[in-house]
Image (spheres, rainbow, N blue to C red):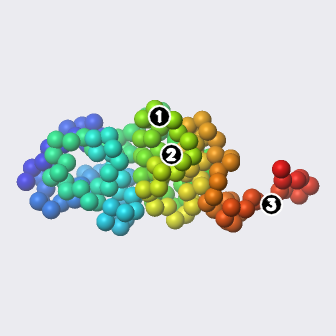
Amino acid sequence: MKVELTVNGAPVAWEIAPGDRLLDSLRAHGCASVKRGCETGDCGCCTILLDGEPAASCVVATAAARGRNVVTLEGLRGDPLLARLQEAFLAEGAVQCGYCTPALLLVAWTLLQSGGPVDEATARHALSGSLCRCTGYVKPLRALLAVAGRPGAQLRGGRGENGLRGRPAAAPRGEERP
């Protein structure tokens, strides 16, 4: 069966089988940023933008994307906001294994692109749909808040840099912690 849709701003026509998932079709056509994770829509590694909204491509039939607009991280290449997010992710060490990074960047970009206010709670909610086992979410959260103009130095909860929940890191020798 033939399906026509827009992928990363370009109209495409793909021959697909009736049960093909959008995840598989995108990867087959060079969208390597879309990762295979749980295949149940729970981990967020396969997140794409479907008509401007984050969606788990592993649970969307390619046929259901007929006539729709799909954006992957590749489609944002050259975007200044994405470049700022990527720099912040690198600066905060939020790209450890990198498997979840494309999805985290995509949802962070979507949140910032919306133009609404971004506070810690909003940022946490946006990132919560992407499973990240390496960073504990603090680093991507700090990066997102930094780009939003709200540095995340006072983040509450989560695992801190010292790995202890809710306890500040020890002050460097000779200095007192406020």
The disc placed on residue 122 is: 2
Which quadrant of the structure image shows residue 158? bottom right
Mark 2 in CB contact with mark 1 (< 8 angstroms):
yes
Mark 2 in CB contact with mark 3 (< 8 angstroms):
no
Q: Which amino acid, mark 2? A: Thr
Asked whether residue 59 is in view, the answer is yes
Q: Which residue is mark 1?
A: 116
**Residue 16 spot, x, y in % from top left:** 13, 56
- Residue at 57%, 61% in the rendered image: 136
Q: Which amino acid, mark 3? A: Ala
Marks 1, 3: nearer the viewer: 1
Q: Quadrant of the N terminus?
A: bottom left
**Residue 134 spot, x, y in % from top left:** 55, 63
Which quadrant of the structure image shows residue 27? bottom left
Asked whether residue 90 is in view, the answer is no
Mark 2–mark 1 distance (CA, rounded to whole Å): 10 Å
Mark 1–mark 3 distance (CA, rounded to whole Å): 36 Å
Mark 1 packing: few (<14 Cα in 10 Å), some, or many (20+)? few
Q: Is residue 169 left or right of residue 131?
A: right
The disc placed on residue 170 is: 3
- Residue at 37%, 44% in the rendered image: 74
